[in-house]
Image: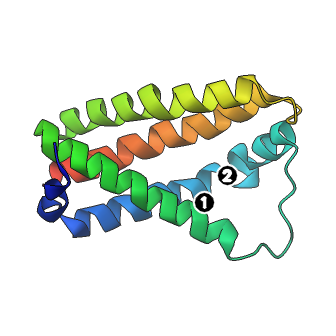
């Protein structure tokens, strides 16, 4: 695989996948869903008036992840919803969940680090599956 695949990406699909992944975060981290658990387990306090970076940084990371998944979809020839699910699970579980659980397992600063890691990695697994489905079927 090379970076030449970037020219072959369906950039509209990348943008839609990015927005879907990011929008999932708005629901996932809402206080009634997992937001309160995420804040409590991570010792996090979100200010009443959050700075723009609270939204911009996650949006950019969703974009980077969507580009990477799009490149992998193109390189593997994933072009069905089923193949998108597999690609999303491989990237979500194999990379996001495994990396975040190591961080959570060894983070003494978080009151319930493993719970925090479960909430965060769950978001990324589901988000990457959604993004991968969009990218696979829209190639």
Secondary structure beneath disc 2?
A: loop
Which residue reaches farthest front? 2
Secondary structure beneath disc 1?
A: helix
The quarter of the rendered structure image containing the C terminus is bottom left
Q: Quadrant of residue 129?
A: top left
In this picture, residue 14 sits left or right of residue 55: left
Q: Which residue is mark 2?
A: 29
- Give the x, y percent position of residue 32: 74, 49
In this picture, residue 135 sits left or right of residue 99: left
Give the class, few, some or many, for how many residues have Cα within 10 Å of label 2's Cα (few <14, many ≥20).
some
Q: Which residue is mark 1?
A: 26
The quarter of the rendered structure image containing the N terminus is top left
Give the class, few, some or many, for how many residues have Cα within 10 Å of label 1's Cα (few <14, many ≥20).
some
Q: Can you say whether 42 is above or below 131 in the image? A: above
Give me the disc on residue 71.
none
Q: Are marks 1 and 2 in contact (CB under 8 Å)?
A: yes
- Give the x, y percent position of residue 86: 28, 29
Q: Residue at x 35, y 28 (%)?
A: 90
Q: Is residue 11 visible?
A: yes
- Give the x, y percent position of residue 94: 43, 26
Q: CA distance from mark 1 to mark 2?
A: 6 Å
Q: Residue at x 34, y 58 (%)?
A: 17
Q: Residue at x 45, y 55 (%)?
A: 21
Q: Residue at x 45, y 46 (%)?
A: 127
């Amino acid at each position: 695989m090379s970076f030449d695949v970037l020219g072959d990406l369906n950039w509209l699909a990348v943008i839609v996948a990015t927005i879907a992944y990011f929008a999932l975060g708005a629901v996932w981290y809402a206080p009634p869903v997992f937001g309160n658990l995420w804040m409590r387990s991570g010792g996090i306090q979100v200010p009443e008036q959050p700075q723009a970076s609270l939204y911009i940084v996650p949006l950019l990371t969703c974009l980077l992840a969507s580009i990477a998944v799009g490149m992998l979809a193109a390189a593997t020839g994933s072009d069905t919803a089923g193949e998108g699910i597999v690609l999303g699970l491989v990237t979500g579980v194999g990379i996001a969940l495994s990396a975040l659980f190591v961080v959570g397992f060894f983070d003494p600063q978080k009151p319930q680090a493993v719970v925090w890691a479960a909430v965060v990695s769950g978001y990324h697994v589901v988000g990457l599956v959604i993004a991968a489905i969009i990218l696979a079927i829209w190639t």
